[in-house]
Image (cartoon, rainbow, N blue to C red):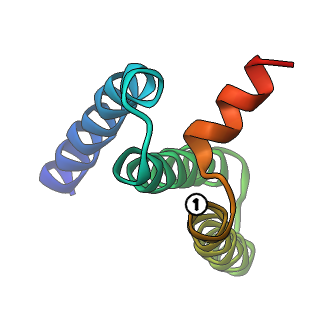
Amino acid sequence: AGKAASLHWTGERAVSVLLLGLLPAAYLCPGPAVDYSLAAALTLHGHWGLGQVITDYVHGDVPIKVANTGLYVLSALTFAGLCHFNYQDVGICKAVAMLWSL
């Protein structure tokens, strides 16, 4: 379990660094590649964060299984929703730019 935990921790740091790089990229060169990268990285970052909340605060085999199943459903719907928004609407980068221009 130690090796898996270490790899997971490294993955979390990598996604965080990726998000730090995607933020200026979203401003400097917005487009589909950045939109879909943000959709994936934000979903994964949120999934891991909420997974840690479950680990810390949900106890008992059945509640943990229910919470984790709910988390996977939520994460899948989040990613699908962001991809749908990127494909059918203006995309994440342009949407944030539009919000800033208000």
- Residue under the image location 21 percent in, 38 percent down: 10
Percent position of residue 57, x then y? 72, 47
Instruction: Give the amino acid at mark 1.
Output: Asn
> Where's the C terminus, which quadrant?
top right
- Residue under the image location 30 percent in, 33 percent down: 18
Question: 91 or 7: which is nearer to us?
Answer: 91
> Where's the N terminus, which quadrant?
bottom left
Q: Identify residue for label 1.
A: 86
Relative horizontal placement of residue 81, taking residue 46 as reference (left or right): right
Percent position of residue 95, x then y? 69, 40
Relative horizontal placement of residue 8, taking residue 75 as reference (left or right): left
Percent position of residue 75, x then y? 60, 66
Q: Quadrant of residue 19?
A: top left
Relative horizontal placement of residue 97, taking residue 11 as reference (left or right): right
Mark 1, Cα crowd under 10 Å, few <14 / some 14-19 / many 20+, is many
Question: 56 or 90: which is nearer to us?
Answer: 90
- Residue under the image location 17 percent in, 48 percent down: 7
Percent position of residue 13, x then y? 29, 31
Vertical arrangement, residue 38 with respect to residue 28, above or below: below
Vertical arrangement, residue 9 with respect to residue 74, above or below: above
Q: Quadrant of residue 31?
A: top left
Q: Which element carries disc 1, helix, strand or loop? A: helix
- Extreme left residue here? 3
Relative horizontal placement of residue 62, taking residue 50 as reference (left or right): right
The total number of labels drawn is 1
Q: Quadrant of residue 26?
A: top left
